[in-house]
Image (tube, grey):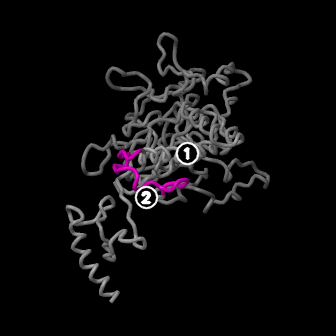
Amino acid sequence: MKLIKYLSVAVVGGFLLGSCSKGGQPTSTNPGAYSSATGIEYGEDEEAFDVPEYAEFPQGPGLVFIEGGRTVLGSMEEDIAMTRDNVERTVTVASFYMDETEVANIHWLEYLHYLKKDSLPEVYQAALPDTTVWSRQLSFNDPYVTYYLRYPGFRFFPVVGVSWLQANDFCIWRTAKVNENFAAQESGGGRRGLFGRGGGNEEPAEGTAPSIESGLVLPNYRLPTEAEWEYAAQAMIGTQYTEDENQNNRRLYPWDGHQVRNPYGKEMGKFMANFKRGRGDYAGIAGSLNDGAMITDYIYSYPPNDFGLYNMAGNVNEWVQDIYRPLSYQDVEDLNPFRRDGYLDDAENYDSSEGFHSLVNDEVRVFKGGSWKDVAYWLSPGTRRFMAQDSATATIGFRCAMINAGSNR
């Protein structure tokens, strides 16, 4: 009898399923009332499989959509350091989201505010940036030690003095805080929430967070992989002018041309990024300053690249997820390449205890992009450097990224 019952339900379900959407095919946002695999009604009783309502999640705060695709990663500059650690190769990077700008001082101060209120004192202390990174024995940068992080005029300058470990912790906190805010808006007094549904019915039990299956949470904010960062900095979308997948040229920098000045319009001759122009020259001549920034600059300064991302060259270098290995270009996959550890290239290969000096181990991370203190060579997306993950400087900041979940666009 049970078999007959299930067959009957499947037949009925088949008819009902056909009317669940205009095209007759179930979708993530409109799965229909019955399973297309078993014909059993969703949520028929307490034992039935329940499918929560779902609308595509909103774009996370601060993020810009980066359409993925095929690209050629690798250095376009002359390898002046003779490292040969980023040789050109063709890869595909899946679509993702990335912060429009570098994380700024105001964002970090907000982070510290909530940590101080909600966490143990030692957690708060561990999150404090190292403001002494500005201090130099033979340079009078002392005012920045006191004022750069907290003075209101520097609110929207990139946070520095942050290690890779601290940046990673910020991503974890940001994920929790954004989802907490979304959940509060979703269930707030029966109003329609950000996800396009009425509040109340899907509200989780007190003291619990919404599950992934509920569709009420954004994916994790995280540091971008090196491949994602380099792909986003290239912004090759701006060099494709036809429908035949041909790109007319590669880019040395995140903008067109092989120069660091704007070749077009009213801004012709203006520098496209904040960097060190030459020995002792950080900004130009008084009365006619060009890049105008002796140190870091406003996070929206300089034109964005074709993905709409600001300062993917200059201002501050940026941490990425990958640990550093010289031969990552030949070891990693060609779809979403990423080096998470020493697989295929163990740290023992670089062991400095054997009488030679090596800085390569499993605690060093890649940073990219060039900074206010770097010459133009380091502005090219394919250049790469590394530093210990618990270290910080006045020239390294970061921005966050996020997977493009539930879509293949």
- Residue 171 numbered mark, or none: 1
Which residue is at a point 47% across and 13% down the rendered structure image?
288
Residue 318 showing in the rendered view:
yes
- Residue 156 numbered mark, or none: none
Region of the chain picked out in magenta, as a range: 189-210
Residue 92 showing in the rendered view:
no
Residue 95: horizontal and vertical position, in percent?
Answer: 40, 51
- Residue 214 numbered mark, or none: 2
- What amino acid type is highlighted by mark number 2? Ser
Q: Is residue 156 left or right of residue 15?
A: right
Crowdedness of circle 1 by 10 Å Cα count: few (<14), some, many (20+)?
A: some
Residue 255: horizontal and vertical position, in percent?
Answer: 40, 35
Write down the quadrant of residue 267 in the picture: top left
Residue 280: horizontal and vertical position, in percent?
Answer: 60, 21
- What amino acid type is highlighted by mark number 1? Cys
Q: Is residue 8 magenta?
A: no
Which residue is at a point 54% across and 21% down the rendered structure image?
153
Q: CA distance from mark 2 to mark 1?
A: 22 Å
Q: Earlier in the sequence, mark 2 or mark 1?
A: 1
Tell me the SS state at disc 2: helix
Q: Is residue 191 magenta?
A: yes
Write down the quadrant of residue 348 in the picture: bottom right
